[in-house]
Image: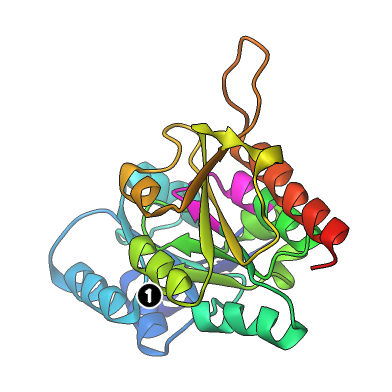
Amino acid sequence: MKNENDFTKNDSDNNVIFGRNPVIEALKSNANLDTIYISGEGGSLNLIRKLARENGIPVKDVQDGKLSKLSGNVSHQGVVAVGACGQYVSIEEILDISAKKGTKPFIIICDEIEDPHNLGAIIRTAETSGADGVIIPKRRSAGLNATVFKTSAGAASYVPVARVSNLSAAIDKLKDNGVWIYGTDATGNDYTKTDFTGSCAIVIGSEGFGISHLIQKKCDFMVKLPMLGKINSLNASVAGGIFMYEVLRQRTSSGN
């Protein structure tokens, strides 16, 4: 019979801890957790919520069916913790990368990219296009889970990712460090006529809603891709890839 403290599963698709006591112990030991999924309130579940909040780990309220799927239909006691497959960094650490290289910062900001396949694809292109790092919010965003790592084809092992509580405040910090913020939206200017050779951060919005209104207001410039067909939008990772390679093209041409 499985002991309550042994409720852990690791395979190619999952790195999860389930059961109240195991999750509590993981939180107390500062385990590298990405997200905690909870169904219910009260008792030790409230303690888990408190510890997660203190550790800056997002908690998502879900139905039992989601927990059963994550735990492989083993008794989960109302909680499953999914481990992060990589360590998050700070914004300062990302800025230090360009400083050490002697280049101008090139950063990708993901605004509510919840599909891990899209986030993984964005990280993969960020790595190949020479971006210094990626910034994601703690809420309403995929994290560094196994799917992201698999989709990134290993790039998530090389691209620093910062996960922040407040994306707006993170943008302010970038601006304080001389980084210009470029939002991507159909109302913007032609991306080929925009100068990306300076310090820049490209904001990629969610597929369903694009960049949030608050983040749009924080952008210094808005840029767009030409759309000639009947469909008026691209997959977030595809659009992001075009913008990233335009930055690379301009910097290569200018020698920056």
Above or below, comparing residue 6 to residue 137 in the picture: below
Above or below, comparing residue 151 to residue 24 in the picture: above
Q: Position of residue 177 (x, y in %)?
A: 49, 77
Q: Position of residue 171 (x, y in %)?
A: 42, 65
Span highlighted in magenta in the image: 109-120
Quarter holding residue 28: bottom left
Give left or right: position of 256 versus 199: right
Q: Which residue is mark 1?
A: 23
Residue 206 in sight in this render: yes
Give left or right: position of 165 versus 227: left
Quarter holding residue 193: top right
Above or below, comparing residue 153 to residue 115 in the picture: below
Residue 234 lies in the magenta stretch: no
Which one is nearer the viewer's eye here, 118 or 209? 209
The quarter of the rendered structure image containing the C terminus is bottom right
Q: Residue at x 62, y 29 (%)?
A: 234
Give left or right: position of 32 versus 41: right
